[in-house]
Image (cartoon, coloured by chain):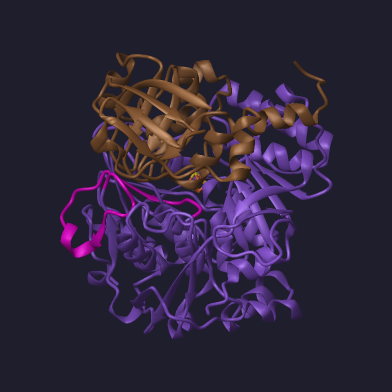
Amino acid sequence: MYESLALEILSSHIVEGPSDPGPGDIVVVKPDLLLMNDITALLALRVIEETGAPVDCSRIRTLIVLDHYSPPPTASIATSYRLLRRFARGHGCILKDVGEGIMHQVAVEEEAEPGMLALGADSHTITYGALAVFATGIGSTEAAYILAQGELWLKVPHTILTRLEGRLEWPLSGKDLALEILSRTGGDGAVYASIEFTGPGLASLGVSDRLTVANMMVEGGAKTALFPVDKVLVEWMRRERGTVKPGWKRLAPRSGEPSMEVDLSSLEPMVSEPPAPYNARPARELEGVEVDQVFLGSCTNARYEDLEAAARILKGRRIREGLRLIVTPASRRVYQKALETGILGILHSAGAVITPPGCGACFGSTMGVAGDEEVILSTSNRNFPGRMGSPTARIYLASPQTAAASAVTGVITDPRSLA
Amino acid sequence: MRVSGYAFKLGDSISTDDIIAGRYLYITDPNELARHIFENRPEIRSRIQSARKPVVIVAGRGFGYGSSREHAPLALKAFGVRAIVAESFHRIFYRNSINNGLLAVEAPGIRGMVEEGEAITIDLDRGVIEVGRGAIRVGGVPGYVRSILEAGGLREMLRRLAGGRSP
Ligand code: SF4
């Protein structure tokens, strides 16, 4: 029988439930990390105020990250931010203020570690599964409940074991793999499941690509998306975080009968057509679609590796006249590194507008909002009508490589023709 | 537990971005949120504004797709939606609904059984949904979830925890 990573991690966090839990069972768990963004924390605050629930952030490490409307575009949002700062100070939560970055990127850079259970009031909390963290999204009332009680109920997920074969080669990326998987699951094929990755293909999939893949599995409905602790992850943890722990061994790659298989060597650059992320098809089939704005940003694809990939294509080139390229690094750290290595300079010279870190245009809140009937090519994760601004804007999703190539030509372009 | 209303039919993969747009999420007052429902989907918006209340949404697969914004069930509830019956739900939306005392019930095949505007009743105790054409059996709500619903949602449970310090 396949021993799921999900159950392995959950088991060490259960405070109440059946003695030998399996898929479908309800367990009460105590998380290691609780995360909230500006939006969901505001609502959690309201719940706390209305119910009078007793709050104690010191029991569970709690982060509040001001990312969705950062920096605030209006006075009322700026005023809400004051409330959040005061709350965090008053209750001992860790506050990541304007410009620190997107919650998920901050968590991956500073907090998440293999074997942890992270509950976050944001659906893309699932991202940290790339670091073998059982990470899943919850609502604001639930975040308030955890602040008061230190625990929450979860249903143990069933598993979709996904075997990766072959090798991922430039200019293919984790985004193309994510879109390929979503084209198979559709919008609800993985609802409540833990998608777990295995197979020889893992060796060519760096942590940045894994984060992109895990991030997008929620678009297929997944509860969590778990990569095992392997050489790639251990080396990354040592380099980026300066830590490796013996307990991680139990989260090693698993074998079992896969329910999905993907050959990375035969992947193609993929693009999602509106109105949903799972509407993905090869970029070459959409070549020629004219683009008004390219957005290189979001918790899916705005890490250093993503900016570097775009710069590799844009170096010595200019973006097409009349097209806007908005670049929003995922965090202050990403911004700093890209500044130091000259990546931001390359993007800027190519014609990009570089914004401070945050969610920005991904969410249609600030810094690159889409107008009526505009066509946007975005490296983010959602292309629902109105997601980036006007409900009549059409949003296509693609990798940084495809986004950069398309920014040069002004039309959706398979990056293999420019790489 | 019995909840009744008039069916308002929707398709598959209705997202929380469809229900309430990102630009309103700094708002926390449910009544104010309710004024903006379905702005990203103007055709749905105009239909639901003239729908007979209380509304029971009858939807397809993957209802509540996407973002964790609890503003979505809050806005629907404040607008006058009593319950949502769908072929399937996305998990965070489902939790958020229950936590706010908005009944969400999975009922495969429901869309073919109900006409727009028809009276519909969900009877959780008997495990059936009653419509004009008869009754449909539905799977139960798990015990733990049921206890949250019966308490009036997780919000109510929090209020009790606080020991009656608030109304
Ligand atoms: S970048 Fe986009 S998807 Fe990610 S947390 Fe921000 S708004 Fe959500």
Q: State left or right for residue A356 relative to residue A324.
A: right
Report whether residue B96 is seen: yes
Rendered location of residue A76, percent (x, y)? 59, 21
Q: State left or right for residue A99 relative to residue A387.
A: right
Q: How many marks?
A: 0
Rendered location of residue B112, percent (x, y)? 23, 37
Rendered location of residue A212, percent (x, y)? 47, 62
Q: Is residue A178 above or below residue B73?
A: below
Q: Colour of chain A?
A: purple
User: Residue at 28% of width from left, 63% of height from top?
Assistant: A270
- Please state which of residues A411 and A19 is positioned toward the viewer in this rendering: A19
Rendered location of residue A140, percent (x, y)? 62, 37
Report whether residue A342 is seen: no
User: Residue at 15% of width from left, 55% of height from top?
Assistant: A288
Highlighted range, magenta = A274-299
Based on the displayed image, in which of its 4 quarters is residue B36 positioned? top left
User: Residue at 47% of width from left, 76% of height from top?
Assistant: A205
Q: Is residue A177 magenta?
A: no
Q: Colour of chain B?
A: brown
Q: State left or right for residue B137 relative to residue A82.
A: left
- Please state which of residues B10 and B29 is positioned toward the viewer in this rendering: B10
Q: Is residue A228 above or below residue A369?
A: below
- Please state which of residues A53 and B128 is positioned toward the viewer in this rendering: B128
Q: Is residue A285 above or below residue B83?
A: below
Quadrant of the frame with the C terminus of chain A:
bottom left
Q: Is residue A279 magenta?
A: yes
Q: State left or right for residue A357 relative to residue A379.
A: right
User: Residue at 48% of width from left, 74% of height from top?
Assistant: A197
